[in-house]
Amino acid sequence: MRSKQNPMVLVSPDLLCQLMERTGDGREVSVRDLATAAGCHPSKIGHLRTGERKTAVEDEAKAIAKRLGVDLLVLWEHTGRANPAPIEPADLAVAV
């Protein structure tokens, strides 16, 4: 069962791409490696990079930020009642 976490919103797909090219340790990270670190499907990372998807659950967002070597809020924004998450297209839903 998927946990009930508020989704986090990606600040910028371009920033994600830039950080993947040069992580905190100075090395590039691939889509597949980042997906493995986040525990999600590589297509989710691909959709985040293109802007087709704007959200990830908090655990994924934390893992992505950690793998890229940045603080969580450099790359992600919290959502909640005051800051609702955008609705993702149904065709991007990936069963895990």
Image (cartoon, rainbow, N blue to C red):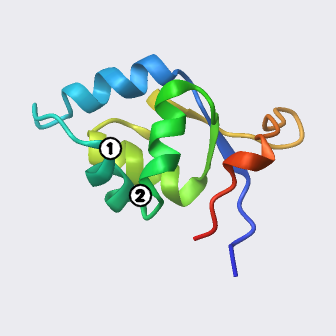
Q: Is residue 24 left or right of residue 35?
A: left
Q: Residue furthest left?
A: 26
SS at badge 2: helix
Q: How many marks?
A: 2
Which residue is drawn at the image coordinates 58% and 54% (left, top)? 58
The quadrant the N terminus occupies is: bottom right
Circle on res. 38: 2
Q: Residue furthest bottom?
A: 1
Q: Position of residue 27 (x, y in %)?
A: 10, 35
Real-space Cα distance between discs 2 and 1? 10 Å
When the figure is inspected, residue 48 is found, relative to residue 59, above or below; the finding is: above
Which residue is drawn at the image coordinates 74% and 40% (left, top)? 79
Q: Position of residue 38 (x, y in %)?
A: 41, 58
Which residue is drawn at the image coordinates 46% and 39% (left, top)? 46
Amino acid found under the numbered disc labelled 1: Val
Which residue is drawn at the image coordinates 33% and 35% (left, top)? 70
Q: Position of residue 3 (x, y in %)?
A: 69, 72
Out of 59 and 29, give the one closest to the viewer. 29
Badge 2 or badge 1: first in the primary sequence: 1
Whether residue 30 can be seen here? yes
The quadrant the C terminus occupies is: bottom right
Q: Which residue is mark 1?
A: 31
Specify few, some or many for label 2: CA neighbours under 10 Å numbering under 14, 14-19, or 20 or more. many
When the figure is inspected, residue 68 is found, relative to residue 74, above or below; the finding is: below
Q: Quadrant of residue 28?
A: top left
Amino acid found under the numbered disc labelled 2: Ala
Whether residue 73 can be seen here? no
Q: Is residue 19 left or right of residue 57?
A: left
Specify few, some or many for label 1: CA neighbours under 10 Å numbering under 14, 14-19, or 20 or more. some
In this view, the mark in front (2 or 1): 1
When the figure is inspected, residue 59 is found, relative to residue 70, above or below; the finding is: below
Circle on res. 3: none
